Amino acid sequence: MLDRRPFWGLIIWLNLCVVIWLVTVQEPVMPEGDAATSGSATALSTLPQTLGSQQWQQISQSSRANGSAYQQACQKHDSSRTQISNHSYDSTSIVRIVEGGSATPAPSPTAASVLQSTAGTDDGQLIDLRGFFYLMAQPPCEWHTQALILVHTAPGNVEKRTLIRQTWGSESLLARTPVRLVFLLGAVPEAEGALQLALIAENEQHKDMVQGNFQDAYRNMTYKHVMALKWFHNNCKHAQLLIKVDDDVYVNTPRLIRNLQPFTDVPMQPATVESPINLTTTPPPMRLFLQQPRDLLLCLKFVGARVKRSYRSKWRVSFSEYAERYYPPYCPGFAIVYSADVVERLYRAAQQSRYFWVDDVMITGVLAQRTNTTIISLKPYILYEPTLLGVLAGQIDLGQLEFLVSWHSISPQQVDALWQMYATQNYTLNSGPSLEVTEGETNDIS
């Protein structure tokens, strides 16, 4: 009979190797009570506000020597646990390097170097992520800011960001207006250091990017969504509106700016209409919603969406993640408008919730339902492709349309063409009252 001892010995040896690998690579789970008071989490949340390219290179080199601190800090969400692990990296060394010192441990920086613009009790928390901090941050909104546009973008989407800066989000348009634009993104893997250096250079030039220390990954979108709420809550709380859009959406900023101006001729009452924009049906003026001071969650409302269970589906959700058969009504994330009070309650609810990776469902569905927040339809104020094509072909007068955003995935060529129509036709940009913020000025424009 064939001797099987060498075969079984090989199996045992392989199993032993796997166990050793798991023990050395797998990160420990931090108890919930200890996570919020972690010393390393506190130290990491006190990084200086911006990192230069040379400083970033120093951090990358130091992190390799200290157990890949950056790589450990920027991880994907692990759906098998509620809390993100506490990583044993030398955060004080990173702080010292950024400040121009050596890589030796040092006391925590003073309050003057705290990254977060407005201090809060949960600065180092983002849902279940403990030790959250900003790799790149921006100063708070100015006093006159009425609307903050936060654009969700991927690190590699520099062309989309450039297009936005050259068209509807241009500095020349938004300067001296009550609208501010900021791009939101997550961290890149340590192996893509060149991309991070490019992002730092891009931010140093434009000063309009906020980057969290979670990995910019498909299943981390909820972190980015809640980071948007967090940044608004801590840095732009006095503003009237948060407008969250994807980087493949066109925002009608000239119309937005005009509709933010005070008015007295239209009663302040919300409307809930479902019909799309057309030339025969006139929806209520957009400013009814944009100047609604409270309880505004404005988006394209999805109702009756069934939870995907198929293993072939990109959107598959297990029963352990979400047990119901259908999702509650929610907002697709390409364009959502929040009033400040809705941001506040959704953010607070998110900070106390279990992580769920389908961000649109979690924030605007589950948490909106939990906080008794009602969705108002944005449908009449979305520029859909058939209408867009008619406008670009000269078959539809742009002046007859009142829209806030385009349907997502509008092409770069269409964005540029639409913007050129605004500029060349002097529509909204140069006709009528000035776009500049003037104290006490009232513009009566629909």
Image (cartoon, rainbow, N blue to C red):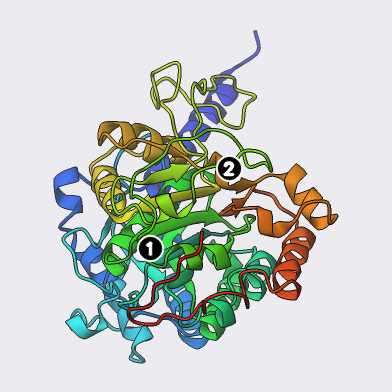
Q: Earlier in the sequence, mark 1 or mark 2?
A: 1
Give percent across and percent down for residue 398. Answer: 71, 58
Q: Quadrant of the N terminus?
A: top right
Q: Locate residue 222 relative to residue 231 in the image: left or right.
A: right
Q: Nearer the viewer, residue 399 or 333?
A: 399
Q: How many marks?
A: 2
Q: Say if residue 132 shows up in the picture.
A: no
Q: Amino acid at mark 1?
A: Phe
Residue 141 position in % (x across, y down) = 35, 74
Quarter of the rendering containing residue 36: bottom left
Residue at point 37%, 44% (across, down): 23
Q: What residue occupies the far top of the structure in this picture?
A: 1
Q: Nearer the viewer, residue 188 or 22?
A: 188
User: Can residue 194 be spotted in the picture?
Assistant: yes
Label 2 sits on residue:
282
Q: Which residue is mark 1?
A: 263
> Residue at image x 42%, y 64%?
260
Between residues 437 and 326, which one lies in front from this camera angle? 437
Residue 359 lies in quadrant = top left
Residue 71: x and y in percent read 46, 61
Characterize the local packing of mark 1: few (<14), some (14-19) or many (20 or more) Cα atoms within 10 angstroms.
Answer: some
Crowding around mark 2 (Cα neighbors within 10 Å: few <14, some 14 to 19, many 20+) is some
User: Is 122 on the left-hand or right-hand side of 83?
Assistant: left
- Identify the disc placed on residue 354: none
Question: Alpha-carbon distance for marks 1 and 2?
Answer: 19 Å
Residue 176, compared with residue 376, is above or below; it is below
